[in-house]
Image: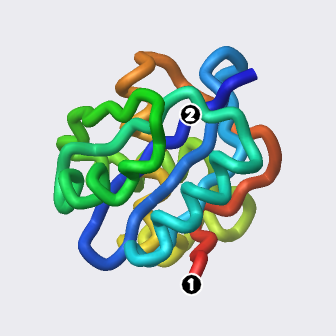
């Protein structure tokens, strides 16, 4: 079944999610340096059947769209307002705190630099107007360098 790529663009780093809409599942969620995005997307479209790419309309979205000229299917620019702010709450929905960790401040478990993949997930969820689940134990803080 075709999958979609969602990108939260940024000047130095981007969040990227690979998901299947019909199953409402996320198969990959990573953060990568912006200069690595084009090659990573090329690799994904070689390995997967990708039906569309959804890019948040924030920082560098136009430049990212231009870099993905080789993708001959639909590229959509979609509103990403407040996704970084909302990403913290969504992180703790996906990965609830349990045990004695509950006594610690939540902020120690995630840094703003690790929220880009969740921001990409929120762009996808807003675009589809549905909530997605994780296909496996995905760490949204995974950096591709």
Who's the residue at 55% across and 56% down the image? 41
Who's the residue at 74% across and 62% down the image? 99
Between 23 and 84, the one lying in front of the other is 23
Between 114 and 10, the one lying in front of the other is 10
- Kindly give the residue lying farthest to the right in the view shown: 136
**Where 6 sits versus 24, above or below?**
below
Bin the neighbour count of mark 1 within 10 Å (Cα to Cα): few under 14, some 14-19, many 20 and up.
few
Image side of residue 50 versus residue 16, left or right: right
Image side of residue 18 versus residue 111, left or right: right
Of the residues under marks 1 and 2, which one precedes in the sequence? 2
Q: Secondary structure at mark 1?
A: loop
Q: Quadrant of the C terminus?
A: bottom right
Image position, residue 126 (x, y; %) = 36, 26
Image position, residue 72 (x, y; %) = 46, 35
Between 107 and 30, the one lying in front of the other is 30
- Kindly give the residue lying farthest to the bottom in the view shown: 145
Report the disc number at residue 66.
none
Image side of residue 59 versus residue 111, left or right: left
Report the disc number at residue 145.
1
Q: Quadrant of the N terminus?
A: top right
**Where 112 sits versus 137, above or below?**
below
Image position, residue 43 (x, y; %) = 66, 59
Bin the neighbour count of mark 2 within 10 Å (Cα to Cα): few under 14, some 14-19, many 20 and up.
many
Image position, residue 53 (x, y; %) = 45, 37
Q: Secondary structure at mark 2?
A: strand
Q: Which colouring convention does the figure follow? A: rainbow
Who's the residue at 65% across and 23% down the image? 24
Report the disc number at residue 4.
2
Q: Can I make out residue 63 in this image?
A: yes
The alpha-carbon separation of the residues under discs 1 and 2 comes to 22 Å
Q: Can I make out residue 133 in this image?
A: no
Who's the residue at 47% across and 66% down the image? 37
């Amino acid at each position: 079944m075709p999958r979609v790529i969602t990108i939260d663009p940024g000047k130095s780093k981007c969040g990227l999610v690979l998901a299947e809409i019909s199953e409402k599942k996320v198969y990959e969620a990573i953060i990568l340096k912006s200069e690595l995005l084009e090659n990573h997307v090329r690799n994904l479209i070689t390995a997967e059947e990708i039906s569309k790419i959804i890019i948040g309309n924030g920082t560098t979205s136009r430049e990212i769209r231009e870099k993905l000229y080789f993708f001959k299917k639909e590229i959509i620019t979609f509103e990403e307002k407040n996704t970084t702010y909302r990403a913290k709450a969504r992180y703790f929905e996906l990965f609830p705190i349990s045990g004695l960790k509950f006594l610690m401040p939540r902020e120690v478990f995630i840094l703003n630099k690790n929220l880009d993949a969740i921001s990409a997930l929120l762009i996808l969820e807003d675009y589809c107007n549905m909530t997605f689940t994780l296909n496996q134990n995905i760490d949204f803080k995974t950096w591709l360098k």
